[in-house]
Image: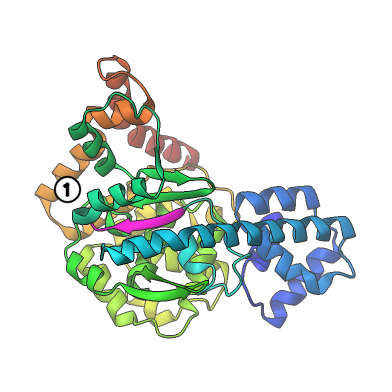
């Protein structure tokens, strides 16, 4: 029951039928400790509070007080982060760096309209690779520190290799910035990166103008991101449903980006799951124009069965590079496929040592590579055994 309850609460607006269903679940007496725990895991507790305020007459006072307290904490934290971010935005803008804020910080005000409803742990910043060194230096001048395991002892060349391999974190007080060098979360170059950066525009957040991706690229990024995390949090699917409900989205451009970048499969499945959770959330034409081939659809069902995602009983979490895997299939470039898979399975030794805080000469490095090679096969085997 908790999954259905949370799904009903996890949109900004509900139909009369959905309100009636929610009222019926409340009359049956929810397992409040379980609701609170699962809601926190799924990142939707603040949305639960918003949905349940109108049912205050049948909800225990202590439950409503706890929900309200969580919402206020989210609001306070967001305001602190937003204020701290102002100096960063001004510095990057003054230096004309190419970058774009994405996901939580981009959605909280512009999509949810209430920054207490969309919690997030860090601020995601997509950076143009050619501006990365300058942005890192600027953050250092502003007092940010690189936050990662095993930072000490790296030569300058190795440090740059580490930073470019995966997303580094920079922290100053409560503000944690995650720097992304892979556009759309892919570990392959975009077929048309110029189009992505040409579409960056400014929106207003708390009195500051911050750069963000064009809506069509942001939607693709949200769909790829939730696949990276195996659809494990409801809030990321809510992001998609709420984002597509806003006017101004150019579906022809979304389809063009998906075809060009080979990302039809992850974008389709993110939209498909959002529409299955909240029927009518996505226009039918949008889905039909993105429907992938038979093989891709079978793989989606194998990795992330629809019924398991909807019931929040996900069987396994697959590696972060799954959107890249589907993009490689879509791009149909054998050389790119082989080079990328080898880079994923065998990341630079300096990065492995840095990320896992082990010595570069340690045999644990070899063990890590063996783990990376066998992990996808083990996960698929476990999934197939569960089907048997």
Tell which of 371 and 120 is nearer to you: 120
Q: Secondary structure at mark 1?
A: helix
Residue 343 image position (x, y, % from top left): 20, 39
The residue under the point 25% across, 66% down is 96
Residue 173 image position (x, y, % from top left): 52, 45
Residue 284 image position (x, y, % from top left): 43, 80
The residue under the point 86% across, 63% down is 59
Task: Answer yes or no: is residue 229 visible.
Answer: no
What is the image's colouring?
rainbow
Whether 293 is drawn above or below 158: the answer is below
**Does residue 135 appear left or right of residue 34 in this picture?**
left
The residue under the point 29% across, 47% down is 137
Tell which of 281 and 356 is nearer to you: 356
Query: Callout 1 environment at 10 Å: few (<14), some (14 to 19), or many (20+)?
Result: some
The residue under the point 42% across, 50% down is 177
Give the magenta range: 123-128
Among the 4 quarters of the image, the one containing residue 9: bottom right
**Residue found at the very far bottom of the displayed protein:** 247
Q: Quadrant location of the N terminus?
A: bottom right
**Does residue 241 appear left or right of residue 49 in this picture?**
left
Whether 113 is drawn above or below 305: the answer is below
Asked whether 125 falls inside the magenta stretch, the response is yes
Whether 349 is drawn above or below 102: the answer is above
Residue under label 1: 337
Asked whether 136 falls inside the magenta stretch, the response is no
């Amino acid at each position: 029951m908790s999954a259905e309850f949370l799904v009903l609460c996890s949109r900004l607006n509900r139909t009369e039928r959905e309100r009636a269903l929610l009222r019926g679940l409340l009359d049956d007496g929810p397992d409040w400790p379980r609701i609170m725990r699962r809601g926190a895991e799924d990142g939707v507790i603040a949305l639960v509070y918003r949905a349940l305020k109108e049912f205050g007459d049948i909800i225990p006072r202590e439950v409503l007080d706890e929900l309200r307290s969580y919402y206020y904490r989210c609001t306070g934290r967001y305001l602190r982060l937003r204020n701290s971010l102002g100096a960063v935005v001004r510095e990057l803008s003054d230096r004309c760096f190419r970058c774009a804020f994405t996901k939580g910080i981009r959605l909280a005000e512009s999509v949810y309209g209430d920054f207490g409803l969309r919690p997030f742990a860090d601020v995601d910043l997509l950076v143009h690779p050619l501006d990365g060194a300058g942005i890192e230096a600027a953050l250092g001048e502003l007092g940010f520190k690189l936050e990662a395991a095993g930072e000490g002892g790296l030569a300058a060349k190795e440090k740059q290799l580490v930073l470019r391999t995966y997303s580094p974190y920079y922290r100053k007080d409560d503000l944690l910035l995650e720097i992304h060098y892979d556009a759309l979360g892919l570990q392959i170059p975009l077929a048309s990166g110029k189009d992505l950066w040409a579409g960056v525009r400014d929106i207003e957040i708390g009195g500051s103008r911050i750069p963000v991706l064009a809506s069509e690229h942001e939607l693709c990024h949200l769909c790829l991101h939730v696949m990276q995390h195996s659809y494990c949090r409801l809030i990321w699917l809510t992001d998609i449903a709420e984002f597509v409900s806003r006017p101004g989205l150019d579906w022809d451009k979304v389809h063009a980006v998906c075809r060009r970048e080979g990302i039809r499969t992850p974008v389709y499945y993110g939209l498909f799951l959002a529409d299955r959770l909240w029927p009518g959330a996505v226009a039918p034409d949008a889905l039909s124009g993105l429907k992938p081939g038979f093989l891709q659809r079978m793989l989606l069902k194998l990795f992330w069965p629809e019924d398991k995602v909807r019931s929040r009983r996900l069987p396994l979490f697959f590696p972060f590079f799954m959107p890249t895997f589907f993009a490689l299939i879509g791009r149909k470039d054998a050389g790119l496929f082989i080079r990328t898979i080898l880079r994923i399975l065998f990341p630079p030794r300096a990065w492995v040592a840095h990320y896992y805080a082990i010595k570069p000469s340690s045999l644990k490095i070899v063990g890590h590579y063996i783990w990376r090679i066998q992990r996808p096969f083990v996960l698929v085997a476990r999934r197939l055994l569960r089907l048997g």
